Amino acid sequence: MTVLYLISILKLAPLLLLIVIGFPAIEWARVVDSGLIAPTQLGQSMLVLMYAFIGFEFSLIAAGETRNAKATVPRALIGTVIAIALCYALIQLVAVSVGPDLGNSASPLVELARRLTGATGAIALSLGAIFSIGGGSLTSLLTAPRLTFALARDGTLPMWFGIVNERTRTPANSILFCGALSLALAVGQQFVWLVLLSTSVRLMTYALCIAALPKIEKSLPKDPGQFALPGGLVIPACGLLLTIWLLSHSSMESFAIMGIVVALGSIIYWACISRSGDAFPIDRQS
């Protein structure tokens, strides 16, 4: 966690500096006079751009190890999404104002930093990108194994994934599996392909979670201190419709891979609960 905090500072500092230096150069008329693009193009673009936002749900995976999770996690979720949206909007405004031709660059933000602050800024932003990639990978390696560990604990994955190292008390097998799988995907596929696949799978997961909310609302006991969305299920309903709309712009290849993953996961799930006789064999209070 200390390393994650440090990397977060190192990757955010160049971006925040870019916003501060470039803010006076923003040409607001470009925003007012910009035209609308076709819905199909908008959906395809948003499917890629969603990759910049996915990952906010990672805070839920570590909620069991979080102090006062009922208050902390909702604030973290909402605050993170708002902060990311604000930062990306400001960076985009600076980019289209200072360099409307940056879309032709292989490294547009580095080029933008070069135009605003010279070679020093370009180097700082390049280092920030490296820290961002490393931080994202490190975050995934911290959270994803906890997910497979939890599934094994609940009896929906083989117990091999739930083995904990006696000395460090960490899910060792899950960490090794997730690390090896991530490395294989990173080496074997291109970035945009991985982005689209990752976004599509996450959106499908979001849709399933949102669709389950009405049943969760009825089945879980009410807690006076729990977070409550204003308007009841209105916001989740809007989120579900938006998620389905974004999913409709996924490629057939992404749908095919998602189908394979779902089929394989379903087989493993039913095999595991058939053996244990209960989808949730372990007392959650323990």
Image (spheres, rainbow, N blue to C red):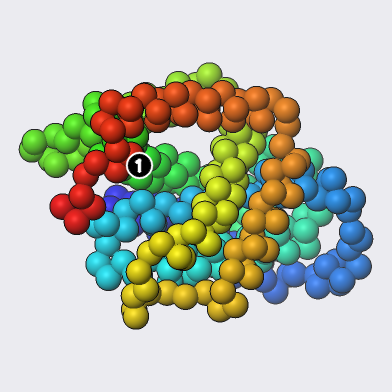
Amino acid type for the residue under numbered disc 1: Leu
Which residue is at the front of the view, 59 or 23?
59
Give the left or right position of residue 45, taking residue 60 as reference.
Answer: right
Give the left or right position of residue 250, taking residue 144 as reference.
Answer: right
| Residue located 75% across and 41% down the image | 249
Which residue is at the front of the view, 22 or 189?
189
Compared with 7, 268 (above or below) is above
Q: How many marks?
A: 1
Give the left or right position of residue 179, taking residue 86 as reference.
Answer: left
Instruction: State which quadrant residue 134 falls in.
Output: top left
| Residue located 55% across and 48% down the image | 208
Which residue is at the front of the view, 79 or 264?
264
* Residue 8 position within the rendered picture, expressed as x and y whole percent measured from the top left: 41, 55
* Residue 23 position within the rendered picture, expressed as x and y whole percent measured from the top left: 67, 71
Residue highlighted by disc 1 = 147
Give neighbour class at mark 1: few <14, some 14-19, many 20+ (Cα, 10 Å): some
* Residue 42 position within the rendered picture, expressed as x and y whole percent measured from the top left: 80, 50
| Residue located 29% across and 38% down the image | 278
Residue 121 visible in this rendered orientation of the protein: no
Local SS, label 1 = helix
Instruction: State which quadrant residue 166 falls in.
Output: top left
| Residue located 75% across and 69% down the image | 26
Compared with 166, 1 (above or below) is below
Compared with 189, 46 (above or below) is below
Which residue is at the front of the view, 22 or 285?
285
* Residue 70 position within the rendered picture, expressed as x and y whole percent measured from the top left: 34, 70
Residue 177 visible in this rendered orientation of the protein: yes
